[in-house]
Every structure is written in C-alpha cells, then in structure tokens.
Amino acid sequence: MPSATTEAFRLMFGGDPELWGIIALSVRVSLAALLIATPLAVAIGYWLAIARFRLRRVLIIALQSLLAFPTVVVGLILYMLLSRRGPLGAWQLLFTPDAMILGQILIALPVLASFALAAFQGADPRIQETATSLGATHWQAAWTLLREVRFGVLAGVCNGFGRVISEVGCALMVGGNIAGFTRTMTTAIALETSKGEFAQGIALGFVLMALALAINVAFALLQGRGASA
Amino acid sequence: MSEPLLAVRGLIKRFANTSNGPLLAIDTFDVGAGACVVLTGDNGAGKSTLLRALAGLETAHAERFDFEGRPIAIHTYPAELRRRIQYVHQHPYMFTGSIDHNIGYGLSVRRVTTEERRRKVDAAVTWAGLDTVRAVPAPQLSGGEKQKVALARAWVLEPQLFLLDEPTANLDATARAQVIALIRRLQSEGRSVVVACHDKELIELPDASRFHLAAGALEQLR
C-alpha cells in the first residue's frame, strides 16, 4: 500500500494526462450541472417559501424526501428514459457526459432547492417589506431577498457540489465509465479498486478531498467577507 | 376648507381566517398637507397595523381612501402610491452593505441615474447627520443610527407622507433626541407626518393633532 501511495503522488504531481483528464471531466460535469440546477432550484425554493397553496406542504415533504433518494436509482430511471427504446432514446444521450450532467442536475436539485427554501423561510420578513415599501417591484424585492440570503443559498451550492462530484451510482449507469470520455473520479476509483490498482484511486481520492476542502475554505472566506460588509 | 392630503373613511381591517370582530374600524381619519398627526394607544391597540394598512403592507378595506383628492383602491394599493407614502419600521431592517446603499435603495429601484443618486444620497446623509458613521456597514449601526438611516432613505424619496412607527422606542437618550430632531425637521420642511408612539415628547410635538386608538376605533384628543 505505501508503494501505491507513492505512485499516487507521482501520478498527481507528475501531471499524468489520464488522471488529470478524469479530474477535468468530473469538475466540468459537476459545474455544468450546478450551473443549470442552481437558478431552477432557487426559483423552486422561493416559490415554495412565498406561495400559499393547498399542496405546498406535500411538495415540501416530497422535496425533502428526495434528499435521501439513492443516486443509483436516479441513474436507473434516467437509464430507462435515455436508453434506445426509452421515451428519450432519440436524444442519443446515454453514455455521454451530457447524460451525466442531466443525472447530476436531478441529484443536485433537491439539495439546492431545500437549502434555498430554508434560506428564504428563515429570512427576516422585514427584507421584502422594506424593499416593497421603498418602491421595489415584486421581482426587485425578490432579488433583494436573494441577495440578503445568498450565503444560505451558497451553502446549498457547496453541499450540492459535494454531493454530485462524489456520487458514483448515476455516473456509472448513464455515463458507462468509458475511458477518456465519461470516466469520472468516482467511477475511476471504483474501477481501479476492483482491479486491485490502488495508485490512481488514492490519487483521485486525494483530489476529491482537496476539492471538498477548497470549496469549504472558499465558502468560509466569502462568508467572512460578507459578515464585514 | 382645502382638501386633506389623505382622507380615509370606513377603514376596516380584519384578521385572516377568523370570525372575530375587526381589529380596526376607523370611521374618519384625515391628514392635512404639512400636518403632523400623533397616534397613541396601548400596545396591541393596532397603531402599527393602521400605519401598515395606510402603507399598503397590510390588506385592509376602506369605503373611501383619497390621496391628494384622488380616490385610491387601498386593497390593491397601486405602486404609484408607494412613491408618495413612506413607512418607517420601529426596528428598521438594514440591507447588507453601506449606508449609501441603504439610502440609495429606493432610488436604485426607480432607476435614478448613478450621478443623481449619489447627489441625493449625499444630501440625505448630511440631512440625517450620518457623515461621521458613513463608512460603517449599515447592519452594524446602533439602533438610533439605523432609525436615522431609515428616515434618510424615506426622506430621499421625497414622499408627501411619512408614516413613522414608534421611531424612538428602545433608543437611548441621545439617539432619541436626534431622531426627534429629525422628525421636527420634517415638520419644519412642511412634510406630512403620522407618528405612532408612546413617547411623551413626541406626543407633545407642537402643532400636532393627536388621536388615540382603543378597541379598534380612533378618537381625536383635544
């Protein structure tokens, strides 16, 4: 095992193209998924926090239940939808990075929306009231509210990033773990470990942990700057 | 006799989802142009609710709600009226950011140009005596300073009517005196002001008419 760790460091710092290609794809897929899911999730969170309608409680419970939804089941559903004979088979997305993005959007959405909902629900009611009484339109007041609760929403984005970059079930099912095309950090770790090749797995594990640390440090710094603003 | 700035007849405010009697049942309430009206009443009498209803922050119904002689549908509260009536909360919320950002907020949402906004914010900062604390982030200000920022961000919009909800509550003596000085300044500038309060000095403001709210009804005091 020590030799595998040494090899892992050599791969990381020696600029191994295969390893860094896997890292780049993983980050690209997860960032794309978050970029698409975040505005949608913020809108869902805002709507559930502000609107009053009969099924609101049911939808909130459903949303929160989706947090515990296994990613492999998301992968399974998406697989059935995207497979050649599935209803979305004509899109020809199965085993492509786009399918993985789609899967990660579905995985990230409940996390992001739940954090956004909690942020909006916990917001001081005077925010929108003050904005409205100062002449803001409904949209301007909503934007002001989002600006005031941005750290709660950002916490959701960090959490969502952690969830999608580290998930393996969906990426494996709809990505197919194709070398150089859809192989992500987590699917590579699973594959390499099953082959008894630990070096790349350890290297990718280090990168995953470093990414998680970097995201949390960046968030803490942002929060610190926000608190003194 | 000239038309009052605000003329309210038969204003009713009920709690939602209750068959209890109305919280407010105001027969007549007039505010003249340039007048100062002091509203007193026990805690929970409905002073804040009345001000909030007049500001369109609470839904209410009125037989008549005339502003500058024009009838207004109070239950739909047109956006245009928010430019003319400004409500200042007892504990004003400060948006994240600078004092300038807070004072300029109402101008920003009205798409006032940056240059004009800067000029007006400068004037409002000076008006409220906030020059010495201008660099302090607004959420970190003291209660009295927040109240002054709230008054300044209403003043900068040049409304015809100010609705002030217990502006001196929970303030120390110095901050209270500064806020009262600003309210007297509004009076001297000829602005119409309705102020809900328990503060003796505000109740005894010169040239103010006084109303007492009890059991949802308004009674003018002599």
Image (cartoon, helix red, strand yellow):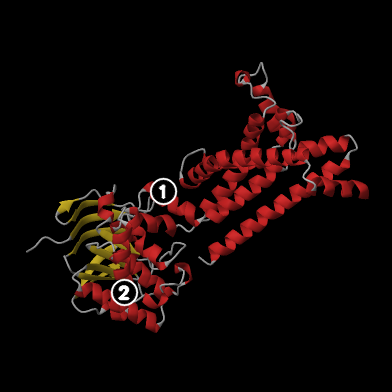
**Left or right: residue B24 compared with residue A98:** left
Badge 2 amino acid? Thr
Position in image of residue B50 (x %, y %)? 31, 61
User: Among all residues in the image, which is located at the extreme front?
Assistant: A14
Q: Which residue is mark 1?
A: B17
Q: Which mark is residue A56?
A: none
Mark 1 chain? B
Residue at image position (73%, 43%) is: A166
**Left or right: residue A112 compared with residue A54:** right
- Callout 1 crowding tier (Cα within 10 Å): few <14, some 14–19, many ≥20: few
A184 w.r.t. B3: above or below: above
Q: Nearer the viewer, residue B34 or B138?
A: B138
Position in image of residue B197 (x %, y %)? 32, 73
A191 w.r.t. A79: above or below: below
A89 w.r.t. B97: above or below: above
Badge 1 amino acid? Asn
Q: Is residue A1 visible?
A: no
B36 w.r.t. A193: above or below: below
Q: Which residue is mark 2?
A: B126
User: Among all residues in the image, which is located at the extreme top?
Assistant: A85
Mark 2 chain? B
Q: Which dot, 1 or 2, sits closer to the camera?
A: 2
* Total count of labels: 2
